[in-house]
Amino acid sequence: MSDIIRLLPDSVANQIAAGEVIQRPASVIKELVENSIDAGADNITIVLKDAGRTLIQVIDNGSGMSDTDARLAFERHATSKIKSADDLFTLRTMGFRGEALASIAAIAQLDVRTMLHGASIGTRLIINGSKVESQNPEAAAPGTNIMVKNIFYNVPARRKFLKKDSVELSNILREFERLALVNINTDLSLIHNDTTLHALRRASFKQRIGDLFGKGIEKQLIPVETETSIVRTSGFISLPENARKRNALQYLMVNGRNMLHPYFRKAILQCYDRLISPEEQPNFFINLEVDPETIDVNIHPTKNEIKFENEQAIWQILTAAVKDSLGRFNAAPAIDFDVEDAPDIPVFSPTGGIMLNEELDPTYDPFATADSSKKSNQGGGTLRGSRINGNIPTDWEKLYDDFSRKRDEAMDEVVGSRINDTVTQSDQFIPAFESLTDGVDDTLPATSTMQLKNTYILTPSRKGLMIIDQYRAHVRILYDRYMAMIDEKSFVAQQVMFPEMVQLSASQNVTLETILPYLEKLGFTLSPLGDNSWSILSMPTVVSGKGGSEIISGIINTVEETGEDIASSLYRQVSLSMARSNAINRGRTLTSAEMENLVSDLFKSSSPARTPEGKQIFSVIDIENINSLF
């Protein structure tokens, strides 16, 4: 049998590595900026053309490279950051594998200019698809300037899967936000198609958060700070009243490195149990500082997943720190007695005696019998503010019997009337629902409704007991209604009496500018105010009375999350966002008529069992399961 194992050419191996490290233009920016940080840069500028598809340029004032280092840096596994495998457990740099530059060079055209500080001349390197075409001395500024052109030009299949420019730019902005949060002592600028999207100057952690996500968010944050021998925790969390229904800002960092850690994220979210509704999530920006020897960052190509040696202990410390902050900053307000008309509270003096504004009857005996009390009252003794009834019954057993008899009679009367009412309502309700549900699954409800915990609607069905999530049911109803209105082009705009301002992040602002023409067709009118702020001048009448800021933010978040082609899916996304914003919340009390209308409207839908996102709306407990309980 002939040999079948072959050594892959470097060009093929580099492209495989690129598939793991470089997924989109945002990945290129992440790797190049982290290299700049490792080189000691404190001023980094990122220049983009066509959302990175045509050009990604990263300019820094770091240490720069010599001629030899510049050439060697683009070879696989060439790095200055580790020398042995043991160094992987003492890492203090962002990069360490030596694969990023080789992977970028394998799928793009590179133009590199670099010069060491103190040198008189730098070097320029031209690379196309891992092949070095030229290297020549050239005047350059101290530091490194890397231009990545035509990403995936030699891998057409990969380039074809790049999203639209608006989606890729949104991904770049989110990556930029993560990089900016862990490098607060670095000046960072982002320029796209000659427009400056960000110009950040070094600042405190809280100021950097405000620079990225709007100054208003700084007022919503409370600090988290604790230090132990295992971990030092610092950062900020949001107050419960500022939790978000969608797209919460949640960032976890360790030793200045971004990470995805579901276990620690869950620890933070659990601290908000019973403080916020299940649909909401808090914002948090938490940085953990641990001994580098207790973590392993070499478990994923993107270095976002990190393994902790003391994971369970850190969970407990993190939970305690967050709960402590919530307790200290979310306490009940103190009573202020220094206000006008405040009550005059007497001060007790051990030597001054007790002064009362009551006239006491010296003959009053609290242990006297009814007869003696009556005689005492007849004698004229009184206690001001009190009245002693002389007709106090003494036959307590007879009194209790009378009370029990009247209670039982009242209960019988109430139960009987409710049974009769239920039968009457059932007789009236069944024909209406049978006509409504002809041809629909026989699990549909058959009689009247009741509400459980102001969240679920309970109604009998032919198979047992149906439990309906009132919020999801209303989302389904409103979504179908809005989609029908779009098909009929029956949206009507209504001018807002007092224009509402919506403050967006840079990434949200880019998305809004892309979808603005579609929003205008639905009746939204927005006017730019500058600094990623917009004024809402009009909205569709179907959402009147609702917060325009919340609706616009929800639409933007839905578009960013799906990443679908806008022309074919925006109206569906807009309908879903408006349905979520206008749906009745869990926790709201509904009348019987409201519940029955909700159930009736739900089963008029073509898809009553699922929300537009595919979440279950109702569940039926079979009569067999109910019988088994008894």
Image (cartoon, rainbow, N blue to C red):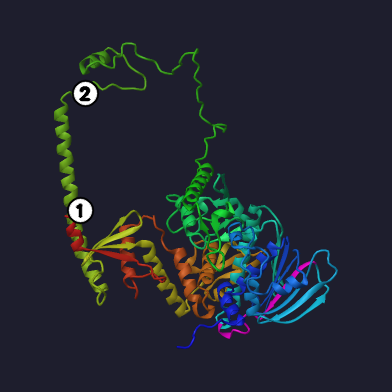
* Magenta stretch encompasses residue 145: yes
Q: Residue furthest front?
A: 1
Quadrant location of residue 441?
bottom left
| Residue interval drawn in magenta | 142-157
Percent of width and height locating residue 113: 76, 73
Identified at 72% across, 67% down, the residue is 45
- Residue type pointed to by label 1: Arg
Marking on residue 392: 2
Quadrant location of residue 427?
bottom left
CB atoms of marks 2 and 1 within 8 Å: no
Percent of width and height locating residue 179: 63, 62
Marking on residue 418: 1
Could you say whether the residue bearing mark 2 is in a helix, strand or loop? loop
Residue 106 vs residue 345, the one in the foreground? 106
- Residue type pointed to by label 2: Ile
On the picture, is 588 further left or further right than 573?
left
